[in-house]
Image (cartoon, rainbow, N blue to C red):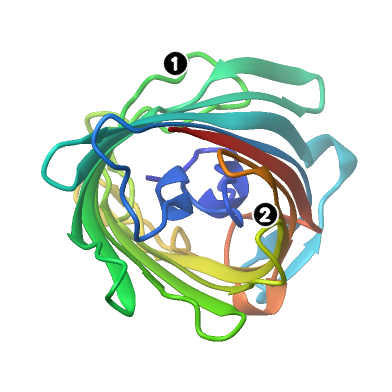
């Protein structure tokens, strides 16, 4: 899974919890049978610098090459029997670059997860699962709204119980990416998220997250394309506000770490807002 926005890193293009794929937003807890979950992850970003392979650093982009995007990942989930759940995410977005613009849905993502460890008496909750990115973006959108590849992902999600005021999260995913056409294969990708929650109360929970990915080179006719690999890392600050047990509102901002990234283009920051509801 890689979003084709002028070589931008995936975590810039498909923003969720801290700028990752939608699946990295999930926790180690799965939904209970017949439990419903709805989630809107709003985001905004504008690329300001692109990577120079010659100089080995990010440099300012001219105005006509800067891409601006805003939108949201819209998620629906349902709990299934046997500690499992099904989730579907549809990104809705608008992008502009120079005098070009496009709006619509991107590549949708479906995920089926199983709760390996879910008991409240255990120190860790753990879920594993599979996901698929589907080629649902418009084929002729310019700027591109998605790769339009069929990708398969394997993931593991874990979070600890509360130790004092702290709760830890770790999420790991590996994507086997498909082809954009008959000759070009997108490089496979490993992504991660590490997060710490600071539980001040049941209502307010600040979070600090680090997220990133490493993506291999794309292949054309079986041959690797030089300088097509990607590496991305970002730090994020988030604040969970729970006015009701069923409702969470979370403003957030992510800061791409240029010194720990390579390839593509980056914004200076990525503000966003998450809202989700769980019933019952």
Q: Is residue 262 above or below residue 166?
A: above
Q: Nearer the viewer, residue 203 or 99?
A: 203
Q: Nearer the viewer, residue 82 or 144?
A: 82
Helix, strand, or loop for circle 1?
A: loop
Q: Is residue 110 above or below residue 173?
A: above
Disc 1 to disc 2, C-alpha distance: 22 Å
Q: Based on the displayed image, in which of its 4 quarters is residue 37 positioned? A: top left
The residue at the far bottom in this view is: 164
Q: Tell me, for residue 139, which label it has, or none.
A: 1
What percent of the width, then of the height, locates residue 112? Answer: 22, 40
1 and 2 marks in contact (CB < 8 Å): no
Q: Nearer the viewer, residue 240 or 260?
A: 240
Position of residue 91 in the picture relative to residue 239 (left or right): left
Residue 55 visible to the viewer: no
Q: Is residue 157 above or below residue 219?
A: below
Residue found 65% across the figure and 76% down from its top: 56
Residue found 59% across the figure and 49% down from its top: 8
Residue found 28% across the figure and 42% down from its top: 32
Helix, strand, or loop for circle 2?
A: strand
The residue indicated by pointer 2 is: 265
Q: Nearer the viewer, residue 53 or 178?
A: 178
Q: Tell me, for residue 158, which label it has, or none.
A: none
Q: Based on the displayed image, in which of its 4 quarters is residue 272 positioned? A: top right
What percent of the width, then of the height, locates residue 217? Answer: 36, 60
Residue 29 visible to the viewer: yes
Residue neighbourhood size for the residue with mark 2, other residues' Cα within 10 Å, grouped as few (<14), some (14–19), many (≥20)? many
Q: Is residue 193 above or below residue 55?
A: above
| Sequence order check, earlier mark of 1 and 2 | 1
Residue found 74% across the figure and 19% down from its top: 100
Position of residue 169 in the picture relative to residue 135 (left or right): right
């Amino acid at each position: 899974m890689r979003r084709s926005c002028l070589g931008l890193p995936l975590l810039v293009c498909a923003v969720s919890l801290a700028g990752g794929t939608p699946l990295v937003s999930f926790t180690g807890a799965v939904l209970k049978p017949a439990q419903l979950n709805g989630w809107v992850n709003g985001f905004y970003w504008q690329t300001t610098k692109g990577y120079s392979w010659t100089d080995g650093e990010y440099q300012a982009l001219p105005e006509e090459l800067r891409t601006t995007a805003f939108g949201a990942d819209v998620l629906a989930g349902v709990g299934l029997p046997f500690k499992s759940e099904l989730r579907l995410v549809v990104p809705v977005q608008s992008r502009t670059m120079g005098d070009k613009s496009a709006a619509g849905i991107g590549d949708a993502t479906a995920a089926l997860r199983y709760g390996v460890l879910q008991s409240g008496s255990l120190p860790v909750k753990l879920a594993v699962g599979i996901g698929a990115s589907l080629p649902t973006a418009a084929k002729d959108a310019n700027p591109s709204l998605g790769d339009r590849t069929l990708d398969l992902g394997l993931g593991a999600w874990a979070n600890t119980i509360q130790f004092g005021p702290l709760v830890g999260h770790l999420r790991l995913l590996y994507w086997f990416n498909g082809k954009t056409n008959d000759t070009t294969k997108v490089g496979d990708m490993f992504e991660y998220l590490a997060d710490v929650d600071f539980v001040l109360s049941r209502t307010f929970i600040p979070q600090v997250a680090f997220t990133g990915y490493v993506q291999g080179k794309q292949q054309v006719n079986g041959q690797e394309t030089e300088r097509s690999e990607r590496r991305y890392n970002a730090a994020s600050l988030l604040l969970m506000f729970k006015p009701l047990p069923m409702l969470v509102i979370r403003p957030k901002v992510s800061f791409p770490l240029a010194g720990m990234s390579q390839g593509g283009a980056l914004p200076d920051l990525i503000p966003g807002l998450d809202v989700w509801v769980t019933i019952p």
